[in-house]
Amino acid sequence: MKRLLLSIWIVLTLPGCIFVLRQVSQHARKEGAPAPTVARNTGSVPPRVRTEVENIVKRGVPGVTAIAMKDGKLLFRLDVGQINSEAQYPVASASKWMTAALVMTVVDEGKLSLDEPIERVLPQFTGEAGQVTLRELLAQTSGEGSLKDLVDIGQDPRISLADSAAQIALRPLEDPPGRVFKYGGPGFQVAGALVEQVTGKRWSDLFEERVARPLGMSHTYWTHLPNRGVAAAQTRNPLLQGGVVTTAGDYMKFLTMLVQMGQFDGHRILTARSVATMETVQTLGKPMAYVPAGVTSPLQYALGNWCATWASDGRCELALSPGAYGTFPWIDRSSGVYGIFFMRGRLPKVADNLHSAMAAVITAY
């Protein structure tokens, strides 16, 4: 299991980020509140997976859903602890994969280019900042800083994404564009402003139209972290690096679309080329100047997701996009198996269990 002996975990443990996550938990929708259940499963669950998921619950996570699929078909679903079948949770950085996907739908139609300077659409970015590209925004190499600055997280949910980007444009770059990787900066908000500017539509409406509705993701919406009491419907500035609230089933529909190279149930969401681009390493040879605690070499970043292992041409073999609450979506391209561990807990506390469980799934199938 060469690719699975990983000591790499995507965790957000900064004090400021932990505060934000505590705040959002207070405002999660009532539908997401777990109901006591007994452990139940569909399909054949590898014994090691069941053991690790049960251990996660023993470590204090109220409940966990584990789902694995291959070729668009369910291998198993396991629910353990206090979690109902439609639990709706914030997924933190697992949102980044969805952000990149929506951006790429606009690239597919030719309204945006990954490699044009952003000043062509957002003239408030000038000088070196204006030369930043959409690719660099999604790869977190734009030079706009890192999660520790809490720039986008500190913004008002009620301003527009254009206003969000204007605030970001006033900040000096920390690094030359494209040179350095720093995780969690405000670049995803700028990408969202680009999308809204060229489409004339609000981010949440466009996501519903192009991703959620065709995939049947009826329990997914965007918010801000923290939402400061602002309802999702009134949120014009969703946190694009971490503001999705969804269910395990909805997220698996999204993963199935990616695994099927942009298609789902007769709908073409993305071109195969865009999916491949999203899963191509962008950071090789660049200093990984700021990464979440626990991330070590050789992990690299693509567009909106991490590459744990990759082929010689840079294509991800194992792609993943975990969030601080423990939600852990992944795609193993070599075997065709993909899945999610879905919960509301603390990723650092259960990272070893998730590692072991993912390895067991891929080994079994």
Image (spheres, rainbow, N blue to C red):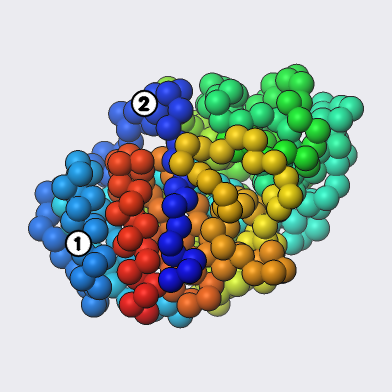
In the rendered image of this protein, does residue 291 appear above or below residue 210? above
Above or below — where is 203 with respect to 67?
A: above
Please identify the quarter of the rendering in which residue 196 is found. Answer: top right
| Residue to which mark 1 is pinned | 51
Q: Is residue 123 visible?
A: no
> Which sits earlier in the primary sequence, circle 2 or circle 1?
2
**Viewed as shown, does residue 139 lie left or right of 35?**
right
Quick check: 75 above or below 64? below
Name the image quarter holding the N terminus: bottom left
Left or right: residue 30 compared with residue 209: left
Q: Residue at x 37, y 79 (%)?
A: 365
Q: Secondary structure at mark 2?
A: helix
Total numbered labels placed on residues in the image:
2
Q: Amino acid at mark 1?
A: Thr
Q: Residues within 10 Å of mark 1 (few under 14, many from 20)?
A: few
At 39% from the left edge and 24% from the top edge, which residue is drawn?
Answer: 19
Residue 356 tag number? none
**Residue 41, percent across and down?**
19, 68
Give the left or right position of residue 3, taking residue 138 as reference.
left
Q: Distance from label 2 to label 1 (Cα)? A: 31 Å
Residue 45 in sight here? yes
7 vs 138, nearest the viewer = 7
Q: Residue at x 69, y 69 (%)?
A: 312
Tell me the amino acid under the disc marked 2. Answer: Gln
Q: Where is residue 229 drawn, in percent x and y? A: 39, 24
Residue under label 2: 23
Name the residue nearer the viewer: 353 or 41. Answer: 353
Q: Secondary structure at mark 1?
A: helix
Q: Position of residue 191 (x, y in %)?
A: 69, 41
Question: Is mark 2 in CB contact (under 8 Å) with mark 1?
Answer: no
